[in-house]
Amino acid sequence: MSEHEVHLLADADIRALAYIAGVDSRRVFPSKEAIDGLAVFDARMPDRESPPLRTVALLDEFGSPATVASNGPNYFGFVVGSALPVAAAAERLMLAWDQGAAMALTSPAGAAIEATAARWVVDALGLPSDSAVGFGTSATSCSLTCLSAARRALLKRAGWDLEAHGLTGAPRVRVVVSQTAHVAIHKGLRILGFGRDDVITVPVDDNGRMDPACVPVVDALTIVCLQAGEVNTGEFDDFAAIIPPAQANGAWVHVDGAFGLWARSTVGARHLTQGVEAADSWVTDGHKWLNTPYDSAMAICRRREDLAGAMTSDAAYAPGSDHSQKNLTLDFSRRPRGIAVWAALHSLGRAGLDEMFSRNIAQAAHAARRLREAGFSVLNRVVLNQVLVRCDTDETTRSVVSAAQASGIVWFGATVWQGRPAFRLSFSSWRTTLSDVDALCDLLARLHRQEPA
Ligand SMILES: *Cc1c(COP(=O)(O)O)cnc(C)c1O
């Protein structure tokens, strides 16, 4: 290894450490000047080589100031989470390994550690212990893989060989989704060739949960998509009421649990997910509530052969098995992204997981209480880590959101709930403390009184 390489990597590490050291106090959304500074990247590709140190310096000098501090404690937007130091450190080592973790042949370490990560994930989530886990890039891509496994399996049971005959002339598969289903589900369905006419949308109650009375009677050619953690309210569909009758008729039940499925690892919230373990497939993210770095998600399938049947990519030169990640995910070449999941679970253990999620749940309840006292309307029951809020008038809601976003002190996003503007606060970061939550509530109270941030 050359001295140049050592120097370059050490330089990047020093810059990364400086960024992390300041992440608690930096602007949460970058200033206009910092964003204007990104113009430096709008350049022609160089004809000649540049010194690598200069390349990294450019990233840090102009890129770092224009980042969103979602890795800090004061970001409450979407359901983002930050990165646990142990998971980020594991990824640093992974970068040095640079493994193409398609199968044991290309990375024995990747295959073994991801196999354990898979076992621990289904254990932590209380799902059937022999479920298959594909470590994919996002809940979006993992939803796509689960839905494609679902359709293939239903067609197979109906006597249709998808590999041989394709979709033309195949029995029609329908999909039942909630009115508040995430756009990732709709995207997956669209890519797989489902049209709007193939989708039955079930209305939701005031908490964003599918109304069980409105779920249609389904047949053995139906995929039912339920949610563990609705993005606005953090609520759960009534799994115990919906899953058994659907499965009794032969339907496939898929659960989108991008963040909410982790309620399974929390003593105080587990009851919300009762019955979810009976589903056929589940998706969850690492990069949201589990606080692993991007991109990290899991496609989990009760019957390994269903997921592997849809995702298999064996070739004479690249033999694998139903346990090879290339046969459980969309990708062939891939980094062993399950290692960061393994690192998080190894370091936290069951107690640490429970503690991390419980802390965020308690923060959401605390914020809801304080915001009600300050005169806001809290629109959801706040059972998990999401708080849905609005002011008396739509103008005030909008002005509070834009003043908070412009402040650089915190960041959260706007939404529309039941036809009117609202905003969402998500408590998903391991870094957020109760005093950060109090500071957020103090700021919102000032804005509500139309004082400066
Ligand atoms: C975020 C989210 C998704 C999409 O997840 P990505 O990892 O961003 O693709 C899907 N469903 C729900 C409920 C989500 O919260």
Image: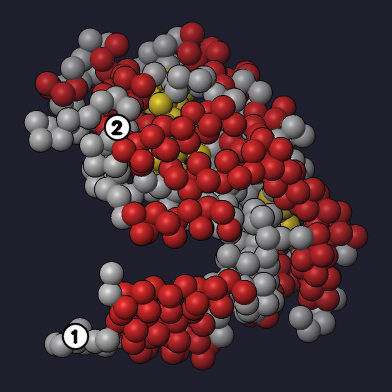
- Dot 1 surroundings within 10 Å: few (below 14), some, or many (20 or more)? few
Give me the residue at 36% from left, 74% from top.
Answer: 6
Query: What residue is at 57 percent from the left and 41 percent from the top?
Result: 346
Residue 295 in view, yes or no: yes
Work out whether residue 441 can be spotted.
no
Q: Is residue 392 above or below residue 453?
A: above
- The residues tagged by marks 2 and 1 sit, at their Cα atoms, a distance apart of 39 Å
Q: Which residue is mark 2?
A: 324
Q: Is mark 1 within 8 Å of ligand 1?
A: no
Query: Which residue was labeled with disc 1?
Result: 49
Task: Please name the residue shown 44% across and 23% down the image.
Answer: 131
Is 113 left or right of 30, judged from the image as shown? left
- Residue type beneath disc 1: Glu
Q: Quadrant of residue 434?
A: bottom right
- Tell me the SS state at disc 1: loop
Specify whether 249 is left or right of 25: left
Q: Residue furthest left?
A: 316
User: Does label 2 or label 1 sit earlier along the sequence?
Assistant: 1
> Residue 152, percent across and down?
28, 23
Could you tell me residue 192's position as x and y percent?
A: 28, 37
Height in image: 100 above or below 40?
above
Could you say whether the residue bearing mark 2 is in a helix, strand or loop? loop
Q: Is residue 101 rendered to the left or right of residue 272?
A: left
Image quadrant for the N terminus? bottom left
